[in-house]
Image (spheres, rainbow, N blue to C red):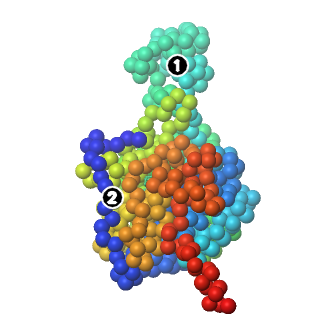
Amino acid sequence: MWRPEERIKWKPDPGTWPDAETAARSELFSPVTIGPLELAQRTWVPAMVPWRATDDGFVTPEVIGWYERFAMGEPGAIVVEATGIRDIPSGPLLRIGNDRFIDGLKDLVAAVRRASGGKTKLFIQLIDFLAIKRRPDPEKFFARFLEITDRHRKAIGGEDWPEEKIRAHLAGLDDEAIDGVLTPRELDSLRQGHRERVTDTHLPHIEELPKVLPGLFADAARRAEAAGFDGVELHYAHAYTMASMLSALNDREDGYGGPRENRVRLPLEVFKAVRGAVSGNFAVGCRYLADDCVEGGNTVEDAAWFGAEFAEAGFDFLSLSRGGRFEDAAQPKVGEAAYPYTGPSGYECMPQYVSDEFGPFGRNVAPAEAIHDAVRATGNRTPIVVTGGIHGFEQAERILASGKADIIGLARQSLADPDWFRKVKTGYGDEVTVCVYSNYCEALDQKHVQVTCNLWDRVKLDEPDVAMTVDGKRRLTAPRWERDLPQAGDETGKEEIDA
Ligand SMILES: Cc1cc2nc3c(=O)[nH]c(=O)nc-3n(C[C@H](O)[C@H](O)[C@H](O)COP(=O)(O)O)c2cc1C
Ligand code: SF4
């Protein structure tokens, strides 16, 4: 993963933990309205893909175990991982592109309700993404994948050469020479792997995105409601279709690219279709980028403008992320696919403890404030969720008290300790396992293997019924909080008294 060149090592500092009375009076543990719903507290577990679904996208016991464990901490809301809205194979990524997925999702919802005692609201993140290929072996690229054009013939002075000769010639050129022959797009396909873009309107399935996506998202949201979720989070963030439609890099010429007014059209049309497909009791919000963090992409000014548009359109919440784009992703190895969290924008999305002078904690707070202000200026109270390096009560409380955001997202901190919420609320904050922002979990995500945290995945392996990763080496969920475990004499004592 890319890291800032300053290489300053930061240590998380959660500050002072509140006692139970202070927590009870706090903003963080006060309720907040999200459209038709009320969250019991202003805490949020943002979407995190744990790579635990079946290869066909179905819920597994391991998926249920993952969400059940978060629910035991009783946060205000949990967002289920990015879940594919199309009925196409997507590896072990959850899917919701057909009614056959509803039953498994119902089980997941029931498990979260049970484990949180009904205290935690549950959303599911709906995602659409475009095709990406692995970085090709250059030999194969020149022999087969590259489409030979007159531009290539002219550049190498081979106008009358047979195609085979041109291919062989190109394959023999060094990097510098090839830079002058291939287009930037062809170079990208050679060095990063071919990746579809929303601007590839010469491809019919890309051209028709504005026609098909509202229906696909709406059908997925209808299934989410049927499965019992409280709402959906439309995934308009990171490297995926909807974020790319919003991005300033989108120069489509069909009325869906270019100026902001055009770029926001499809996200609004999707929202409208989704809203129309679900009941008034069901929340519909989105996650989008407070900053694309790539050259030529959206800035916080764009994001503030979009925030105002979303609020006016009636979105029930806006959850902010940042970066995580393909444009600056690191070059993958031959045979591997590019990953959008490996460049500077990926760093902004999931900043690690090795950082710059600003550090990894709260990088999205100032942008959130600008977006919050823009939303409030429209007269709407749409709640804003801010996430990124937040791990302490005081840090969260300061953000809320100063009106920079309305809800606090803790992604990796919730993974490091799913009981953070209950521990802090009940005055046991000093028992929190604080995330060290090592990004071990993120590296697992990158390899598409079952995500765990290295602060707990090899401890207490002798506990009864510990679910393990497929390689049998790591536990899949955090150990229970000691105080939740039956204490010696608990049960027998009770029985004796009852008798
Ligand atoms: C393992 C892992 C998987 C993630 N998957 C998603 C995802 O499915 N959708 C999403 O919007 N963000 C995803 N994220 C980003 C997080 O939601 C969050 O924005 C990011 O980790 C920064 O917040 P934090 O500092 O509190 O961890 C993922 C992060 C991690 C570590
Ligand atoms: S592995 Fe654990 S400690 Fe490291 S960043 Fe992930 S959640 Fe935090």
Q: Which image quarter: residue 234?
A: bottom right
- Neighbour class for label 2 at 10 Å: few (<14), some, many (≥20)? some
- Residue type at mark 2 is Pro
Say whether marks 2 and 1 touch (CB < 8 Å). Answer: no
- Residue type at mark 1 is Asp
At 26% across and 43% down in the image, what residue appears? 6
- What label does residue 232 carry, if any? none
| The one of 327 and 41 positioned closer to us in this rendering | 41
The secondary structure type at the circle numbered 2 is loop
Q: Residue 115, how many percent across, how many down?
A: 60, 72
**Any part of residue 243 in sight:** no
| The one of 363 and 35 positioned closer to us in this rendering | 363
At 37% across and 84% down in the image, what residue appears? 21
Look at mark 1 in the image and give the residue it sits on.
Answer: 150
Look at mark 2 in the image and give the residue it sits on.
Answer: 12
Q: Residue 490, how many percent across, how many down?
A: 58, 79
| The one of 110 and 435 positioned closer to us in this rendering | 435
| Discs 2/1, front | 2
At 37% across and 58% down in the image, what residue appears? 389
